[in-house]
Image: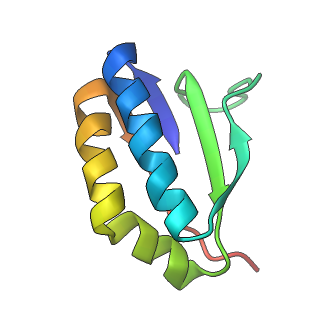
Amino acid sequence: MRIDVHDPETYKSYIAADAVAIEAYRGWFLVRGGRHEAVHGPARSRNVVLAFEDYETALACYRSPEYQKAFAFRSRSAVAEAIVIQGG
């Protein structure tokens, strides 16, 4: 996920709600923020990479009521892109 936060206070609510969904679907963070450099193309100020047991679980988490509650906070507080990718 690539993120530009424009409302930090509301984004804190997203982080709290997001954690509920990620825990429920047994996901874990590989990257959460941190130093980065865009070597080609545009960048956002924050980058997050999550992992799940499998592709279907990642999609189920995103589509879950728990995550959609979190998404309501994110959509009001940040501009972001999210992509689910099957590992190989």
Q: Position of residue 63 (x, y in %)?
A: 32, 69
The quadrant in which residue 59 appears is bottom left
Q: Is residue 65 left or right of residue 26?
A: left
Residue 81: in sight, yes or no? no
Q: Is residue 11 above or below residue 66?
A: above
Q: Residue at x 62, y 76 (%)?
A: 86
Q: Residue at x 44, y 48 (%)?
A: 18
Viewer-side residue, 41 vs 74: 74
Residue 78: in sight, yes or no? yes
Which image quarter is the C terminus in?
A: bottom right
Viewer-side residue, 6 vs 26: 26
Q: Position of residue 66 (x, y in %)?
A: 34, 60
Q: Position of residue 70 (x, y in %)?
A: 33, 47
Q: Is residue 79 above or below residue 56?
A: above
Count of marks placed on residues? 0
Q: Is residue 52 above or below residue 44?
A: below
